[in-house]
Amino acid sequence: MTVEVRLTANLQKLAGNQRVVFGEGKTVGELLDDLDAKFPGLKGNIVVDGRLHRFVNIYLNDEDIRFLGQLETPVAEGDVLSILPALAGGR
């Protein structure tokens, strides 16, 4: 199933400066594996030790996957996944 994935600026650098990419998979985890095959290193900025990095939020059709099935959350044709690493800094 093809899923649209929206990336923030820091992840776009790993995806050839593309704001939107498309991937395949039955779950969010499989989708990230597919994207990592296309854009090596992308998944390493999102997943640590097999779990979603604590400073990364992923939304599937505006629903936080932490409250769904995390990386096992099913995806379907036409879904939109947004990956949002937390911003930090300032005083």
Image (tube, grey):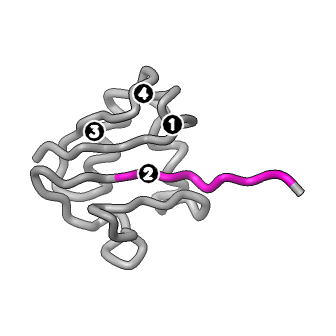
Residue at figure coordinates x 19%, y 54% from the top left: 79
Quadrant (top left/top right/bottom left/bottom right) for the C terminus: bottom right
Indicate left or right for 24 with 83 as reference: left
Indicate left or right for 2 with 85 as reference: left
Q: Quadrant of residue 60?
A: bottom left
Q: How far apart are marks 1 and 3 (CA)?
A: 15 Å
Range of magenta residues: 82-90
Residue at figure coordinates x 52%, y 26% from the top left: 13
User: Which of disc 4 and disc 2 is earlier in sequence?
Assistant: 4
- Residue position for label 4: 15
Amino acid type, mark 2? Ile
User: Which of disc 3 and disc 1 is earlier in sequence?
Assistant: 1
User: Which of disc 2 and disc 1 is earlier in sequence?
Assistant: 1
Q: Distance between the residues labelled 2 and 4?
A: 13 Å
Q: Tag 3's secondary structure?
A: helix
Amino acid type, mark 1? Leu
